[in-house]
Image (tube, rainbow, N blue to C red):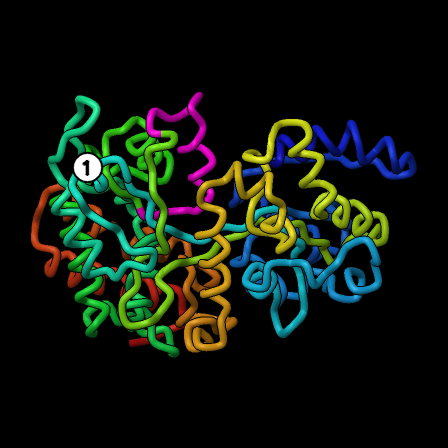
Amino acid sequence: MTTTLEQYTKSVFEKANPDVSINFLTLPETELRQRVTRDVSTNAGEFDAVVIGPYEVAVWSKNGWLEPLEEMASADSSYDLDDLVPMTRSYLSADDKLYGAPIYGESACLMYRKDLTDSMGIVVPDAPTWTEVLALARQLNGQSIDGKTLTGTTMRGIAGEILTPLLPMVSTYGGRILAPDWAPTLLEEPTLTAIVDYVTLLQETGQPGVATAGYTEALASMSQGQSAMWIDSTVAGATLEDPSQSSVAGKLGYALAPHAETNFGGNFWSWALSILSSSKQKEATWRYISWATSLDYLKLVADDTGWNTVPPGTRKSLYEIPEYVAATPNADITLKSFDLGSAPESEIILKPTAPGRPVSYFDHPNWWDFNLQMTAPLTAAVADGSSAQAAAEAAQAAAESAMKQSGLWNG
């Protein structure tokens, strides 16, 4: 994504703006945080803009590291702030101020082998429940098509990433993994039921190696025709429908992510360009960000490499372009997911800080380390087939220990 942006920056933006030169630096996540912290704390102005997500927006805006973009965006007649997908905008905002201009947005959806379900006379609902999906996974597990015997699902099972599908599942069951005082609540109902259901699903219907699988491995299993269903990022459709990368292009169906007690079972993530408060070139930086996150930029990508390669989930007007909708079979489901997740009736799970937000992270300064410690027992159970209940109990103990270490909860 950033590689493509860098190419167009040099060939298009800098030619049209000869007074601005953009220098890219790609860093690992941990090093990025360290460098940015040092930069803003000393007001050095080493960096002007960074690519970050909703987690960083939530934490970094509190630290005063990010420049609010609302006024610049509103004053920029070419930007069209109101064209941003509402859900994307909400997750890149804090205290009703926009801190990130989206370059990409995704939710979750159910992707399934429609050729297989059609052959079995099964109609998959557009908005399935988790009860229906759990049953369907077991019904499809071991079925054969195109000379291959399929697993019922391909999912993320590796520690850390396992929470990406699991946390929205907990949320739509009506549960939570953390209380408002940061106390771990994995053994509370209905959280425990959601955890047991997910671990058991992977044990019984997951692809080979599911315990070491993240997004990339799950995508490979689906695109190679080895699995019948996958619940993951809406952006995966672009790869799955590309015949040069997928053996199942044209054979898939799409539905909303399964739900339970709430009407929205998905999650959300976005990448965005933000201006650091220490930047000494905010006007020029905004000029670049405005261009890089505009509808015109999306059209530039489409003209060059096709509508199916356009970064999704940023602008409402993209989903009104017939060529894009035709090239993206899950465009309708993606937009419905965005709309459903930001609807008024979903406000109970759309709070700006943890817990309770339908995403796969919490506004916790040591979230990623906490996540790894908490989910390791769940991954171990997926790997060896041991008790999901016992795994949840071990995860609760690990979460309590990690939260105490963080200093946010004392038990």
| Residue 91 place in picture, x, y as percent | 55, 63
How would you rate the neighbour count of disc 1 (Cα within 10 Å): few for under 14, some for 14-19, many for 20 or more?
Answer: few
Relative image position of residue 127 (x, y in whole percent): 33, 59
Q: Quadrant of the C terminus?
A: bottom left
143 is within the stretch colored magenta: no
Q: Is 357 situated left or right of 85 in this image?
A: left
Number of marks in the rendered image: 1
Q: Position of residue 289 (x, y in %)?
A: 74, 48
Residue at coordinates 58% horizontally, 45% vertically from top-left? 32
| Residue depicted at 17% across the width and 36% down the height | 151
Image height check: is 305 above or below 76?
A: above
Which quadrant would residue 242 be assigned to in this image?
top left
Q: Which residue is mark 1?
A: 119
User: Residue 119, relative to residue 97: is it above or below?
Assistant: above
Q: In the rendered structure, which amino acid carries the disc numbered 1?
A: Ser
Q: Which residues are magenta?
A: 231-248
Image: 134 above or below 226: below
User: Is any part of residue 168 visible from this angle?
Assistant: yes
On the question of residue 35 being in view, the answer is no
Q: Position of residue 48 (x, y in %)?
A: 75, 48
Q: Is residue 351 left or right of residue 37?
A: left
Magenta-drawn stretch contains 233: yes
Front-lying residue, 11 or 253: 253
Front residue (pair 72, 302): 302
Where disc 1 sits, the SS reads helix
Q: Quadrant of the N terminus?
A: top right
- Name the foreground residue: 148 vs 5: 148
Front one among 82 and 62: 82
Residue displayed at 18% across by 41% down: 152
Residue at screen point 78% across, 27% down: 11
- Horizontal relation, residue 233 to residue 61: left or right: left
